[in-house]
Amino acid sequence: MSSPLISEVLPDLLEEIVFLLQGTGAEPLEQQLRSLRVESICDCGDENCASFATATKVKVAEVVELNPTEGFLIIDLDAAQQICFIEVLNRPDVKYLLEEHYLKRADKG
Ligand SMILES: [Zn+2]
């Protein structure tokens, strides 16, 4: 069982993040983002949270804060400059897609 690519589950969010990276100095992260997988969904229980981990080990060393028109988007990097977690808050659109994806998978058994 392999984890889904962000581009499979959240294609619109991926393009939004790539767009928001422009001008931040972190544009090279685009390549990494396009090959990243949603390893696990944040289990903090906050109903406004749609964050997810993109690595099996999350150890944040640096963050890139984006400036979306809606909600909060923050990319967490580990010490090796690998994206390990993406913080998504107040984005019901993203939460809906994540839940839908994981519910569907649960239904299939
Ligand atoms: Zn959370």
Image (spheres, rainbow, N blue to C red):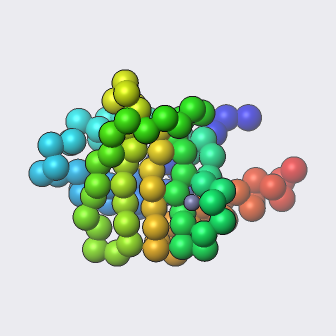
Is any part of residue 80 visible from this angle?
Answer: yes
Q: Is residue 69 above or below residue 37?
A: below
Q: In the figure, residue 96 lies in which quadrant?
A: bottom right
Q: Is residue 108 above or below residue 48?
A: above
> On the rendered structure, is 17 left or right of 106?
left
Looking at the picture, how far across and down is residue 17, in whole percent? 32, 55
Q: Furthest-right residue in view? A: 109
Q: Is residue 102 left or right of residue 24?
A: right
Residue 37 vs 19, above or below: the answer is above
Residue plotted at (29% across, 55% down): 65
In x, y percent, where is residue 60? 43, 38
Pick the residue in front: 17 or 67.
67
- 80 above or below 76? above
Q: Residue at x 46, y 67 (%)?
A: 89
Q: Please tell me which residue is depicted at 54% across the width and 63% down the height of the picture.
A: 50
**Image x and y of residue 90, in percent:** 46, 74
Q: Report the image quarter containing ligand 1.
A: bottom right
In the image: residue 8, left or right of residue 65: right
Question: In the visual, does 104 lie left or right of 21?
Answer: right
Residue 21 horizontal/vertical position (percent): 23, 51
In the picture as drawn, the residue positioned furthest to the left comes out as: 23
Quadrant containing the N terminus is top right
Can residue 96 be spotted in the picture?
A: no
Query: Which residue, as the protein is rendered here, is positioned at the far top?
Result: 80
* The one of 17 and 55 positioned closer to us in this rendering: 55
User: Image quarter for residue 19?
Assistant: bottom left
